[in-house]
Image (tube, rainbow, N blue to C red):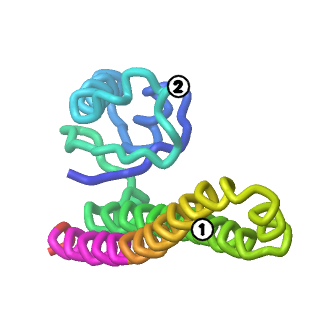
């Protein structure tokens, strides 16, 4: 079985025309068989309006319908899929790192603010505020440590996912 990617065809006839070369006196019947085989192998193709471009399509063997040479083999299809997943992992890793960095920066700013002249003046004016600000400082310090630890966890998880992806691709392309 081969794989291809969906390119936005509007109907199954167009998809079959792109994926198969069908000639001869029984071309209409063979095309219908190809459509049925595609739908059986790819239930998500029942409503092409809901299929995103680039979606993977399994292309079954159909007697009398030659696969078009531009189809990807399972290996190159797996490689294309892996490349897409790698790009998504980089984007997720970047977003998670940015979020953890922003949280850490916010906590550092809070801790710096708590050391400011304005806050010290407020404490002198109202000693009861010191208890609340001590709690805020403690919570901010804890959240800063959590954000930094979370960033390290994200980095390790992304590295593990990339390794697992490489292992999976290796098994698919044997």
From the viewer's perspective, is residue 172 above or below residue 34?
Answer: below
> Looking at the image, do the residues carrying marks 1 and 2 touch, with CB atoms under 8 Å apart?
no
Residue positioned 66% across, 54% down in the render: 128
Task: Kindly identify which residue carries mark 2.
Answer: 49
Q: Nearer the viewer, residue 63 or 93?
A: 93
Point out residue 88 in the picture as x, y percentages from the top left corner.
48, 61
Q: Give me the C-alpha separation between circle 1 and circle 2.
A: 35 Å
Residue positioned 35% across, 23% down in the render: 28
Asked if the magenta segment contains residue 169, the reply would be: yes
113 relative to 83 in the view: left or right: right
Magenta residues, as a range? 156-171
Point out residue 101 in the picture as x, y percentages from the top left corner.
59, 71
Q: Nearer the viewer, residue 56 or 129?
A: 129
Quadrant (top left, top right, bottom left, bottom right) of the C terminus: bottom left
Q: Secondary structure at mark 1?
A: helix
Residue 30 visible in rendering: no
Residue positioned 51% across, 66% down in the render: 138
Residue 164 is tagged as none
- Crowd class of label 2 (few under 14; some 14 to 19; many from 20; radius 10 Å): few
Q: Secondary structure at mark 2?
A: helix
Q: Nearer the viewer, residue 169 or 155?
A: 155
Residue 98 is tagged as 1
- Crowd class of label 1 (few under 14; some 14 to 19; many from 20; radius 10 Å): few
From the viewer's perspective, is residue 159 above or below residue 22?
Answer: below
N-term-proximal mark, 1 vs 2: 2
Report the mark closest to the observer, 1 or 2.
Answer: 1
From the viewer's perspective, is residue 28 above or below residue 72?
Answer: above
Residue positioned 47% across, 75% down in the render: 148
- Magenta: main secondary structure: helix
Asked if the magenta segment contains residue 97, the reply would be: no
Point out residue 103 in the picture as x, y percentages from the top left corner.
59, 64
Quadrant position of residue 162 = bottom left
């Amino acid at each position: 079985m081969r794989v291809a990617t969906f390119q936005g065809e509007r109907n199954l006839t167009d998809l079959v025309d792109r994926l198969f070369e069908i000639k001869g006196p029984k071309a209409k019947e063979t095309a219908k068989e190809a459509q049925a085989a595609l739908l059986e192998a790819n239930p998500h193709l029942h409503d092409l309006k809901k299929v995103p471009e680039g979606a993977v399509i399994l292309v079954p063997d159909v007697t009398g319908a030659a696969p078009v040479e531009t189809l990807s083999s399972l290996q190159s299809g797996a490689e294309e899929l892996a490349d897409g997943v790698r790009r998504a992992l980089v984007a997720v890793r970047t977003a998670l790192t940015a979020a953890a960095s922003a949280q850490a920066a916010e906590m550092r700013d809070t801790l710096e603010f708590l050391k400011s002249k304005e806050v010290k003046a407020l404490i002198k004016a109202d000693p009861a505020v010191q208890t609340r600000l001590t709690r805020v400082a403690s919570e901010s310090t804890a959240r800063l440590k959590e954000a930094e630890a979370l960033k390290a966890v994200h980095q390790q998880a992304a590295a593990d996912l990339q390794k697992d992806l490489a292992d999976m691709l290796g098994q698919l392309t044997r």
